[in-house]
Amino acid sequence: MSLENTTIVEILDTFEFLDDWEDRYRYVIDLGRKLPPLDESEMTDDYKVRGCQSQVWLVPEKDAEGRIHLRGDSDAHIVKGLVALVLLIYSGKTPDEILATDAKVILDKLGLAAHLSPMRANGLFAMVQRIRDIAEAA
């Protein structure tokens, strides 16, 4: 499965199918492994997400239609999987679509917040806020 052909609906379906949280964690880690790595030159403070326990970088690129495409990376496997989830929710949308999307609703459907450490959950929502900030600035 390629990440670029994956939808958040497929993720939700897979999560429903996997009833064991250990299997769900493995699935999230596998999603992160499918992310193309960022170039070293992109792993700078300009792209770093504040509020994450692990190092996380989000690189936005705006296309001709005004859609924001995001690339991301992390130095931690589970967090890289969370980056992949957030990118699936937001990447390729217009700034208005990003601002109209409530990631918390989608992430609550996955049940992730209840199964992440408080620091990881804070980091996840720091990523969401960073993407919203990017959209507001666009």
Image: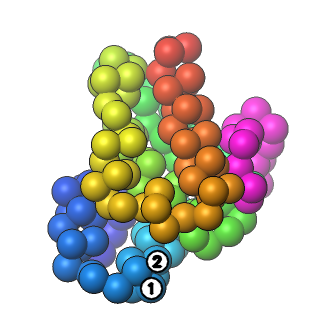
Q: Residue at x 81, y 38 (%)?
A: 45
The magenta-colored residue range is 38-54
List the residue tagged with mark 1.
22
Q: Residue at x 50, y 15 (%)?
A: 136
SS of the residue under disc 1: helix
Q: Which of the pair 48/106 is nearer the observer?
A: 106
List the residue tagged with mark 2.
25
One can see residue 39 in this view: no
Q: Position of residue 53 (x, y in %)?
A: 74, 56
Per the image, is 25 magenta? no
Q: Which of the pair 48/107 is nearer the observer?
A: 107
Q: Residue at x 57, y 53 (%)?
A: 121
User: Looking at the image, do the residues carrying marks 2 and 1 touch, with CB atoms under 8 Å apart?
Assistant: yes
Q: Position of residue 131 (x, y in %)?
A: 52, 32
Q: Position of residue 37 (x, y in %)?
A: 61, 62
Q: Is residue 33 left or right of residue 46?
A: left
Structural crowding at the residue carrying mark 1, measured as other residues with C-alpha within 10 Å and reported as few (<14), some (14–19) or many (≥20): few
Quarter location, residue 21:
bottom left
SS of the residue under disc 2: helix
Q: Amino acid at mark 1?
A: Glu
Quarter location, residue 31:
bottom left
One can see residue 90 in this view: yes
Q: Amino acid at mark 2?
A: Tyr
For this orientation, the residue located farthest to the top is: 137
Q: Residue at x 33, y 69 (%)?
A: 2
Placement of 75 over or under 126, stated as above or below:
below
Q: Is residue 75 left or right of residue 110?
A: right
